[in-house]
Image (cartoon, rainbow, N blue to C red):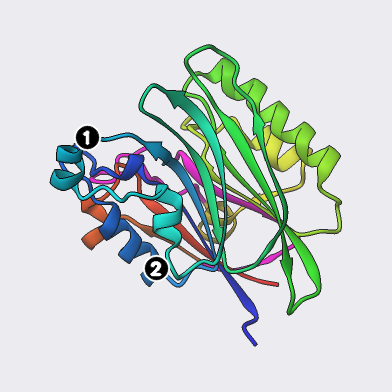
Amino acid sequence: MKKDLHVLTYNIHKGYCSGNRRFVLETMRERIAETGADIVFLQEIHGTAIKSNAQRRRFSYPDQPHFEYLADEAWPHFAYGRNAIYRKGDHGNAILSMYPFVSWENIDISIFPGSSRSILHGVMELPHKDTRLHTLCVHLGLLEQERREQLQALTDRINSHVPKDEPMIIAGDFNDWRRRAEQHIHQDLGLKELFVNMQGSHARTFPVWAPLLPVDRIYYRGLQPIACRRLSTGPWRDLSDHAALFGVFNL
C-alpha cells in the first residue's frame, strides 16, 4: 500500500507554450503523467474553448474540456471551478486526483471587474488512511490590494470549513512575488510552505526560461514533507510560461 502522497501544481497557460506560438496540451499531459502525482493542482485551464474547425485541426484542440483531457485515464476523479467566462469559453482552476472527492466547491474571490479569481476547495477520502484531505487550488490576482483581500477570504474559508485535525494542502499561483502571503498563510493558519521548509526559500517559477519570481507555492498542514522539486528544465522549459512544482508528503 502506497504510504506517500505525491502532488504537483502547475499554471498551464491555457495549454500554450510560453510565447503562445504552439498549443502543447498533449505534451503537458504526457509530462504531468510522468511525474506520478496522486493529486494535481492546475491553474489557467480551459473548461470550454470554442474553436473553429480550422483552429482545431491546426492546433489539435481536444473536443472535451481540457481538465478531462489531462485527467485521461491517469486520474479518475477531478473537479473544475471557472474563474473567467468570456464569449468563446471559460478557464479556471482544476484538481485531478487518484482519490474520490467527498465534496468540492468553487468560491468566488474576485475583487475587481475583469479580474475573476476563485478558490477551488476539494475534500478527498484517503481510504488507506481512513482520513479526509482538504485540497485548495488557488490563483490570486496581480494587484497587491486584491491579493490582500483574497488572502483574507482564503483564511476565512479555512477557519470556517477545515477542521484543525484534518490534513490540508493549498497549492497554486499566488502571484505573490513580494512574499506578503506569509502573514496570512503561516502566522494566521499555521501552514508551512514546502520549498521554504525544505530548501530555505520559495521556488522561483516565473518565467520558466529564467525563473526570477516566486509566484507558485505549495502550503501544507498536518503532513510530513519528504521531498520537493522545481520542474523548469529539459522538456518542461518548452511548455507553459510557469515552472511546475512537485512535492512528496508522508501521510
Give the farthest residue toward the top: 113
The answer to whether the residue labelled 1 contacts the one labelled 2, judged by CB atoms less than 8 Å apart, is no
Q: Amino acid at mark 1?
A: Ser
Nearer-N-terminus badge (1/2):
2
On the image, the x and y values in percent for residue 10 come to 43, 50
- Secondary structure mostly seen in magenta is loop
What is the magenta range?
201-227
- Describe residue 28's horizontal placement relative to residue 59 as left or right: right
Closest to the observer, 190 or 42: 42
Q: Which residue is found at the position 40% from the left and 49% from the top?
A: 66
On the image, the x and y values in percent for residue 242 come to 35, 44
Residue marked by disc 2:
33
- 233 over 35 or under it: above or below: above
On the image, the x and y values in percent for residue 78 come to 56, 56
Q: Amino acid at mark 2?
A: Ala
- Describe residue 52's horizontal placement relative to residue 161 as left or right: left
7 part of magenta stretch: no
- Secondary structure beneath disc 1? loop
Residue marked by disc 1:
52
Q: CA distance from mark 1 to mark 2?
A: 29 Å
- Secondary structure beneath disc 2? helix
